[in-house]
Image (tube, rainbow, N blue to C red):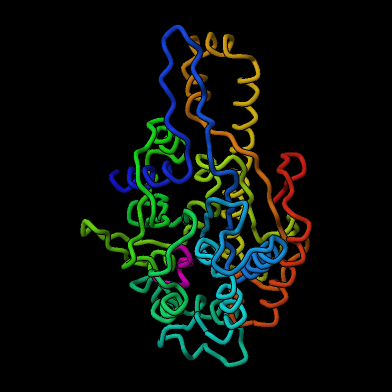
Amino acid sequence: MSDRRGFLRAVSTLALAPALTPSRADAAPEPRESKSVSHALIVAGGGARGAYEAGVIAGLVRRGGIAEGQTLAPYGLVCGTSIGAVNAWFVATGQYAALAHAWQTLAAANIIQLKSKYTTLDHPHAFIAVRIRAALRLASDLTEHDTGIARNDVALDWFKQHIDPTVPVLMPLVWAVTNLTTQSPEYFYRMPPSFAGGVPSDIRRALALTLGPSAVVREASDAMLQEALFASAAIPIVFDPVRLTMDDGTADLYADGGIASNASIRFANNIARAIDVVFVDPPSRNQHYANAIDILIGSYETMQRQILETEMRDVYFESLGKRAVLRLGPALVHRLERDSPPLDTLVRDVPSSDLAYMRPRQVLPTGLGAFDQQDKIDASVALGDADSASGFTPYSEAAFRL
C-alpha cells in the first residue's frame, strides 16, 4: 500500500489538479475530471511485432519535430506492456535514436537462445518460432521441473545493454506485469526526479475502483529496473518466470504483463484526458492451425486481444455514461445520487477519457517470435512509420473490431 501511495503522490504532483473541496450535504457534488495530463500514449504487447510500434514512434517524432532528449508532445504519460514496455522506456527517456538502433540490430543480438538441453533443436536455418515449437513438442521436462525453454540470462543481458537506470525519465512511465505468485496484475512505474507532494483522496479511490482491489502499483528502483522490464516481456513457457525482490525483502515470480493487461488503458484513464493506443494486430481475420502448438499460441493471442478490446470498450462506455449523466445538470444529478449510491460512485470516482487508436492496416510480416528475422522487422518498422502519418482514429464501438 505504501508503494501505491508513493506512486499517487508522484502522479498527483506531476499530472493532476488539486483535490476537490468536499461538497456540503445540500450542494451538488463536483465530479473529479480535473486532469492536467492532456494525453497518454499506450504501446501494447505483441512480441517481435513491437517493431511496428517503434516505426509509429519514429514517425511521430519526426513529424512532430521532436529532438533527441525531448518529450514526445503532446504526451505526459506513457504506458507499456511486454515489448511495449521496452518501447515505452525509450519514449519516456527521449532516447529515440537508441530505440531505432535497438530494433535495427535486434536479429543479430540473438536474444532468444534455447537452454543447453534443447540445443540439438537449434538448427542454423530454423527461425526462432520454429525452434520453439520443436522444443515444446519434445520437452518432457516442462511437465516435471523445467519452467521455460529459453535462457533468461541471454535476454536479460540485452536489457542490461539497452536500459540504463541512471537515465531519468522525462514523463511518468508505467508498465504492466503479471505476478504469478499472487496471480494478480501489478504496475511498475518510474517518475521524473523532480516530483513531490500529496495525493488527492479521490484519485486514490478511483485507482482502487478501476484497477480492482488486487492490483498493486509499485515503484521500480534502479536496482530492479532492468529485471522488472524484462519480466513484463517474459512469455510463459518460453522464458522462466522472473523472480523480483522488493525493498522489504519479499520476492515473487513475475511473467508477461500481457497475461493480465496487454494495454494499461484503465490505468491511463485515471490520469489523462485523452488516450492514444498503439497495438500490433490488424482487423480480425480467420486463422488456420496446423498442430496443438499453433493452437496454444493462438489461444494466448486470443486472450490478449480480448483483454485489450474489453478494456477499450469498458473505458469508452464508462466515459459515455458519465458524460451523459453530467449533462442532466447539477441539481438533477444530485437528486439521482441521493437515490442511487452506484450513481454517486460513477459521478465522483469513475474517470472519463477520449480514446483513440492506431493499428496495422495489414498483417505484419513479423510473427510473435520472429526476433531473428531482421528483414521482416525492418519491414514492420516501415509500416508503422507510414501508418503514423494518418494519425490516431477515434474509438467507435461500431467500427472497432479486434
Q: Residue furthest left?
A: 249
- The answer to which of 107 and 115 lies nearer the viewer is 107
> Relative to 31, is 43 above or below?
below
The verdict on residue 234 being magenta is yes
Could you say which quadrant of the image residue 298 lies in?
A: bottom right
> Relative to 45, is 332 above or below?
above
Magenta residues span 232-240
Residue 21 locus on image (x, y percent): 42, 22
- The answer to which of 49 and 128 lies nearer the viewer is 49
Q: Main secondary structure of the magenta part?
A: loop
The residue under the point 55% across, 42% down is 272
Could you say which quadrant of the image residue 139 lies in?
A: bottom left
- The answer to which of 143 and 206 lies nearer the viewer is 206
> Relative to 91, is 155 above or below?
below
Residue 284 locus on image (x, y percent): 73, 55
Asked whether residue 293 appears in the rendered view, the answer is no
Asked whether residue 199 appears in the rendered view, the answer is yes
Residue 345 locus on image (x, y percent): 47, 23
Residue 329 locus on image (x, y percent): 62, 14
The verdict on residue 180 being magenta is no
The residue under the point 52% across, 89% down is 122
Left or right: 102, with 25 as reference point: right
